[in-house]
Image (spheres, rainbow, N blue to C red):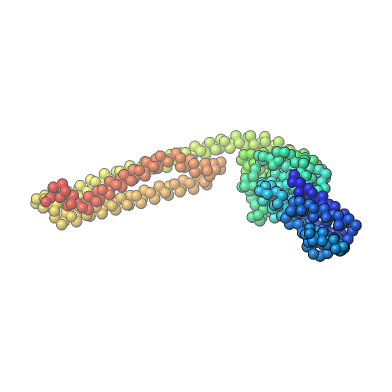
Amino acid sequence: MVPGLIELCICLKDLLVDAESFDDLPERIRIDGAYSDTIQQHIGKLFEANEKYDFNGLTIRVNDEAIGNDEFHELLGNGEPIQSWQILISKRSIVNQLFPQDDISTIWFLTAQGLDRWINRLDPFGESSKIFHEKCSTRVLVCELDHAFGGPSLAIDRIDGKQIPADWPQAFAGPDENTVKRQVHLLSSENTALKPTSFLLSWGDIDSATASRFRMLSGQMLSACLSQEFYDHSRVVLKGSRRIELPLSSEQDEIPSADDLEAIWRAVSWVYEERPEVRATLIADRLTLDLSHGQSLLSGVNHFIEDAMKQSIEQYKFVIAERKDVYAKELRELLKDVQQQASLFSDKVRSILNSLLRDVLAALLLVSLGLFSRIGRTEEILASKEADLLFKALAIYLVVSLLLQLLVHLRDLHLSRGELKYWTNATRNQLGIDDIEKHLNIPISNRRSSFYGMVIILSIVYAAMAIAAWNFQCVARLFGLIS
């Protein structure tokens, strides 16, 4: 661990002997005192440490004035007495200086009492625990601490940090916060944290008295991950064989032991391993039957989680087997609908092609009846104004015919796809949204591409015929039909 922090804490501990009052808060330290026989020596040692490490955020006041090392020795040389003194330290400044570019949030305390006051005010889900979520891991260092403990992303140790495992922070294989929030419906502040790894305990002296408050926070966080709805500490919801609202924890709850936390963590890991909505419901089925009126979720989980896990694992096998049958049945029905949709694309192509042939025959009939039935020379008839108007009318007919067909067929395809998606979503229970989209798109992607390709080709043919009809006399002159 950083030697500068250790030496600073040693100096501050010496000053506490002469202190009249002090505050040991997460953000700062304040120590106040008056004259004593040893205060000159202790402040001198603090100045020596500051000369050595140049601490950021350290302010030393003597006789109500902020002074530096030179001023302090000048004061002593002049024989001025130290009537009052004050030490102010910004902990964040010290941390930023001693732990630069560290992806670990570091909190340190001079006394165990400071740690206790801070941890007893922590809400694992609220703003007070923000520091546990700012970075990947959190390290808490305390000058006076008998036991070291922690988890994959949490470490609590003495100020030297020697008992923290060498491989910490450790890999975390459980669910992340986003996964939990997709399963647990949050009905509270948007800033509510549901991050299991923040307070998970897995190493060290977890059953020590020092770790008791952390065990409670860990139990609350893990229990919340097993609920279906989360409001706050006083209200969570389990939806199992019956729907019950209950407090997350209460003051009467026993603090979970290390074994209790391990059992709860196994349940959370199992739930979020796969199909969390199904597994969480199976756990809730048993818990809602076992929980008594007025009991908190944490208390119920402490007592019943192992039995709930055993029953849920057995039931899950049957539920999955049954769901697989239902899934296969729904998939077959969906694929039948998709096959009908694919056939619709083929029918539309054939319909446009038949309409093209019909329009060609209609055009030939129109030309035959409108022009060639008249008596006279063919060249005079083709060059006449009536022939020009007739062919321009034919061009307009071809364009209108194409546009109406495209409008009708594309609109019909759009509506039929919308109806298919609606009925699929309304009648499927096992197929997820992603599965539905995949099976609606992939099987008919080639058929759809072929349809639009043929539509483009037939549209080009229609357009060519319309252009030729509109400019018929020019085309006729080009081929020498008229002079």
Image location (x, y in percent) of residue 295: 76, 48
Front residue of this view, candidates 450 and 341: 450
Image location (x, y in percent) of residue 447: 39, 40
Residue at x 62% of width, y 37% of height: 319
Numbered-mark total:
0
Residue at x 70% of width, y 51% of height: 97
Residue at x 78% of width, y 44% of height: 160
Residue at x 76% of width, y 49% of height: 5
User: Which residue is most to the right?
Assistant: 37
Say whether residue 180 is visible: no
Front residue of this view, candidates 149 and 111: 111
| Quadrant (top left, top right, bottom left, bottom right) of the N terminus | top right
Question: In the image, is 207 to the left or to the right of 462?
Answer: right
Question: In the image, is 400 to the left or to the right of 203?
Answer: left
Reply above or below: 107 against 274: below
Front residue of this view, candidates 95 and 285: 95
Front residue of this view, candidates 387 and 196: 196
Reply above or below: 210 against 37: above
Say whether residue 19 is visible: yes
Residue 358: image quadrant is top left
User: Which residue is most to the bottom?
Assistant: 64
User: Which residue is most to the left?
Assistant: 376
User: Which residue is most to the front?
Assistant: 77
Image location (x, y in percent) of residue 310: 71, 36
Image location (x, y in percent) of residue 370: 17, 52
